[in-house]
Amino acid sequence: MDNHLHVLCRLDPSDAEAWSDEDVVRRWIAVYPPRTLAMDDPDVLQKWIAHEAKDTKRVALLRQRLADLGWFMKALKEPLARLANKADGTRGTFWEARYKSVAILDTEALLATCAYIDLNPVAAGIAETPEASRHTSVRQRVEHAKAKGQIDSLKAARLGSVAGGNSIGNLEQDHWLVPIEDRRVRNATDNKVSASRRKSEEVREGMLETFSLGSYLLLVEYTGRLWRNGKANLNAGLKEIFDRIDSSAELLSERIQRMMQANSLRGSFFASTKESLQEFATNRGKRTANLSPQVA
């Protein structure tokens, strides 16, 4: 946006703990490459990584940083600030504040947040559609489908959730964004895929099981039309989506409308129901859900 940005992150400490020491070093230099290291020489690079991985204290620090939201935001915002200051010919603080984070607690809140972020440029009047704006995940996912020569399959996927999910396949497995659909269970039980192929192909964890990219595009399109025009047609594929997450078009649309109309997201936690907040409070050892939550 013109004065802020939205980033949806998934924190998974167990993944970071499972990385080998060399994995940690390799991931770190992907973000912060040493100036004196020949990154284009595989032999030199591997020897350097193996040497650095022997420093256990250093590796532990890097592992902690790679899994930390605050460090991620620093790594994201600092280069942007430098670029902006260079373009403006100025120096000093670029961002007004550090950042505000809101934890998302359930599936419906996750979908509402995704749609809210992708529709933000539309709501601000700087783009007519989410895929027409330059920096949305929808734009990135559609461009990726074009580059893979699967834009026709993606268009077909928007016509229905189940058929669409099958036709689009594993399109997002090699995309830098987290895949919309979590296909691990589906691929593991797919009789059409050989056991050797399933073993050799790493299937990345996605956001939601049985929820395809086509379904998500359909949901964003529906929500965007409802927000802009006050009405939209609910086709069979979209109705199936809402049934699957035990929700309805009316409920989700109402929640996104409230998010769009708010000046900012309130509180530290976002859930679609008070029950989700109470469960989270209980897991944290709290007697009540008095955790500055927002229920949309």
Image (cartoon, helix red, strand yellow):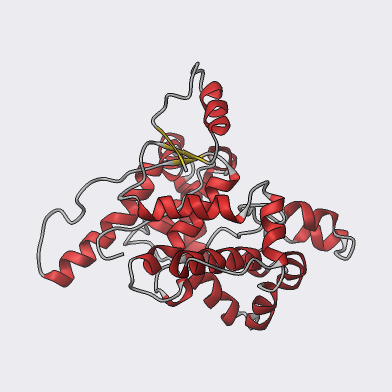
- Given residues 73 and 120, the one toward you in this image is 120
**Horizontal relation, residue 55 to residue 204: left or right:** left
Q: In the rendered image, which quarter contains the N terminus?
A: bottom left
Q: Kindly identify the residue that appears in the image at 11 percent across and 55 percent down.
A: 92
The image quarter containing residue 219 is bottom right
Report whether residue 222 is seen.
Answer: yes
Check the image and name the residue furthest to the front.
230
The image quarter containing residue 68 is top left
**Horizontal relation, residue 285 to residue 79: left or right:** right
Question: Is residue 271 depicted above or below 88 in this figure?
Answer: above
**Residue 238 screen position, x and y as percent:** 67, 63
**Horizontal relation, residue 296 to residue 162: left or right:** left
Q: Kindly identify the residue that appears in the image at 45 percent across and 57 percent down.
A: 116
Q: Kindly identify the residue that appears in the image at 47 percent across and 48 percent down.
A: 51
- Given residues 102 and 125, the one toward you in this image is 125
**Residue 111 screen position, x and y as percent:** 55, 53
Give the mark count. 0
**Residue 274 screen position, x and y as percent:** 53, 32
**Horizontal relation, residue 52 to residue 185: left or right:** left
Q: Kindly identify the residue that appears in the image at 65 percent across and 56 percent down.
A: 204
- Given residues 201 and 233, the one toward you in this image is 233
Report whether residue 26 is seen.
Answer: no
Question: Is residue 6 depicted above or below 291 in this figure?
Answer: below
**Residue 223 screen position, x and y as percent:** 52, 63
